[in-house]
Image (cartoon, rainbow, N blue to C red):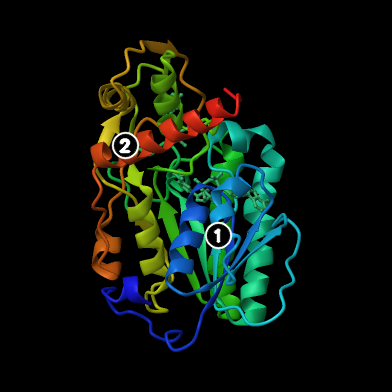
Amino acid sequence: MKSTARVVGLDRRAETRQKTVLITGGAGFLGSHLCQRLLAEGAKILCVDNLLSGRVTNISALMQHPDFSFWEHDVVDPLHIDGPLDEIYNMACAASPPRYQADPIHTFKTSALGAINLLDLAREKGARILQASTSEVYGDPNISPQSEDYFGNVNTFGPRSCYDEGKRSAETLFHDYAERHGVDIKIARIFNTYGPNMRASDGRVVSNFVIQALKGKPITVYGKGEQTRSFCFVDDLVDGLIRLMAAPAEVNFPINIGNPVEFTVRELAEIVLEKTGSRSALQFHPLPQDDPLQRRPDITRAEALLGWHPHVSLEKGLQQTIAYFQSELERKSARGAV
Ligand code: NAD
Ligand code: UDP
């Protein structure tokens, strides 16, 4: 595994033969980058997705590759796979608040039943399994930055609960399968990540602001835009996930993966306007219920245990993201779809 050669304490068990890797949610934003990267590194990829928020266009360039296969399947239902399996990245779950709130019961089932089905599969195959957890396990945090030993401030009874509590339940299941069945687990608590392959209609803040700016439409700032987020570029994030997967078996507890540089949502809007050269106006909307006021990862563990640190600044990452959405808009306009 070329790119993980610098990983602290690299686990070398699968280096001599081609790895088979299952990526659930592989047609989504993060999953598609992971498919592309691991395929380029020589792995055989099985991509599973129900196409709820993902798109075949994210993986269409990979479809011709002999080591890539796609299976349309919902992880709420058990998975039966023939042959050996070395690693599972469980990325399946819509991450955008409007998308995961559209069918909250299915969102919860995706995290809880999906975790059970994939942990059972990992146990059957003796595969290592990584869970895409989230900074949302900290809820609306009353400490900053958030380190992994903070238990969080989460509402069990609100519009975001299906996602937050679903992800928390998945972490619990990972803990218990490791304890009781010896399953080889990894847990990445992912903080806000952005980049190419996000859907224009996804509803998250970076895609909304960039598309609005490029179209000359009002920039929809929720609340006063004083709430903060820390934005990680997708390449950095994928690097962190791959390093975590390659870490020694003892690293079987949650690890924050995110960029610790914090911005207010209003600052983000202003940077997007500057980078796009757009003259769109800011338009203020009510702050959604339970929207966390601050979010910033403490990445001490990732730095110490994985030798990982993000390298791409928001300005640089936005440049690539803006270029991606610009070409998406041009492609759609050429097809008469805008
Ligand atoms: P995304 O919505 O683009 O991708 C999620 C993918 O999972 C989609 O392709 C979707 O179709 C698929 N999916 C959803 N429910 C499924 C189901 N029941 N069965 C099979 N496939 C299903 O989101 P993303 O940003 O790529 O997020 C990927 C993972 O990372 C998610 O689990 C998310 O919770 C986690 N995460 C992402 C971020 C972020 O900022 N991007 C932050 C924290 C956690
Ligand atoms: N947000 C916003 N305008 C938008 C979309 C989101 O101001 O058009 C805000 C949202 O209220 C939140 C932050 O941007 O405070 C990040 O939202 P996102 O949905 O991207 O992710 P979250 O971190 O809330 O899951």
Residue at figure coordinates x 39%, y 46% from the top left:
191
For image coordinates 60% across by 29% down, the residue present is 335
Q: Is residue 161 left or right of residue 307?
A: right
Residue 15, position as x, y percentages in the image? 42, 85
As helix, strand or loop, the secondary structure at mark 1 comes to helix
Residue placed most toward the observer, 335 or 75: 335
Residue count near mark 1 (Cα–Cα under 10 Å), binned few <14, some 14–19, many ≥20 = some
Callouts 2 and 1 close, C-beta under 8 Å: no
Q: Identify the residue at image location x=71%, y=41%.
A: 105
The N terminus, quarter of image: bottom left
- Mark 2 and mark 1 lie on one chain; the one further toward the N terminus is 1
Q: Where in the figure is residue 126, as x and y percent of width and height?
A: 59, 82
Tell me the element at label 2. Answer: helix
Residue 211 pos. (x, y %): 44, 25
Q: x, y (%) of residue 271? A: 26, 26
Name the one closer to the observer, 257 or 48. 48
Q: Which residue is mark 2?
A: 318
The disc at residue 62 is 1
The answer to which of 15 and 154 lies nearer the viewer is 15
Above or below 213: residue 292: below
Ligand 2 within 8 angstroms of badge 2 C-beta: no
Amino acid identity at mark 1: Leu
* Quadrant housing the C terminus: top right
Q: Is residue 148 something that shows in the picture?
A: no
